[in-house]
Amino acid sequence: MRPRSGFSLVELLVVIGLMGILIGLTLPAVQQVREAAGRLSCLNNLKQVGLALHNYHTTHRQLPPLKVPRSSSDPNALLGWMALILPQMEQEALYRTSVVACQLDRDPSHDPPHVGFTTVVGTYVCPDDGRLSSALTDRFGVRAAYTSYIGIGGSVPPGALRVLAGTLGFSPGIRLSQITDGTSQTIMVGERPPPDTLQAGWWYPHYVGSGTDHHGPNNRLILGPIRLFSDDPCGVGKGTFGPGRTDNPCDRFHLWSLHPGGANFLFADGSAHFLSYSAEPLMYALGSRSGGEVVELP
């Protein structure tokens, strides 16, 4: 009788052990590839936003919004800059619906008629944040669509007595020629994931927030120490750019991302770059459009 061919128990255990080692070596590499793909896809989102902003500027000779009376039902008085560039984002139908909605109801958080308030625009969402793939409902029962990005409204360097103006969030919007620090030296949009409390991150309305909801900032962020509502548990914000957590609502007051080590930024020249958290000391200078600072990017 011929002996059977096959693995002994020892050989089988060795093979299983080797497979375990190979899987253990492969998983981190797969994770790194996924992280790199998510970061690049997010960077591409910001490039598209930059192209839309520049096309808007070409058409209107300024960044959004246009000058209108504050009491107007004009979209430029009620909607945020992300809503105002919808035509340049190939979302013409949604923009036209929003224009009609403003004429019917001056509160852009009412849906209907403001369907944009609960409509997710994929380009405004970082692919690494699966939470934002659909509209979300906060603790007040308000259902809204959220964004991973926020405009840079300026900065308040340590010891400064006033805000050094930035690029987005002003009414009316500025001209690119007003960025005297140089468009390649000024950030226009950065990453800032909404907190799990959903206290910030609406993309559609031009709304800061007030009262007991402690909502915002949404469309723009002022970099630096910020005095919040007197009863807000976050107190005075610290820092401009550093690691954050979605379970910490106070992290909504500084720039950060779900990518390891840093975040993506859109510059005023339309380029987009990933900056590591070590660039935090440069944020005050990058956030102002005419502060006269000289910046050398890492």
Image (cartoon, helix red, strand yellow):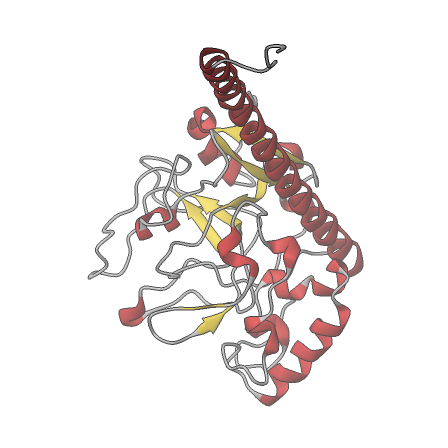
Residue projecting furthest to the front? 1
Q: Where is residue 155 shown, x and y percent of the image? A: 44, 42
User: Relative to 23, is 285 above or below?
Assistant: below
Residue 182 visible in the picture: no
Determine whether, in the image, residue 236 is placed left or right of residue 197: left
Determine whether, in the image, residue 8 is placed left or right of residue 162: right
Q: Residue at x 74, y 57 (%)?
A: 56
Q: Residue at x 49, y 20 (%)?
A: 16
Closest to the observer: 147 or 214? Answer: 147
Q: Where is residue 44 shown, x and y percent of the image? A: 69, 42
Q: Residue at x 57, y 77 (%)?
A: 69
Determine which quarter of the picture holds residue 270: top right
Residue projecting furthest to the bottom? 104
User: Relative to 150, is 187 above or below?
Assistant: above
Rendered-image quadrant of the N terminus: top right
Q: Where is residue 150 shown, x and y percent of the image? A: 52, 51
Q: Where is residue 9 shown, x and y percent of the image? A: 45, 15
Rendered-image quadrant of the C terminus: top right
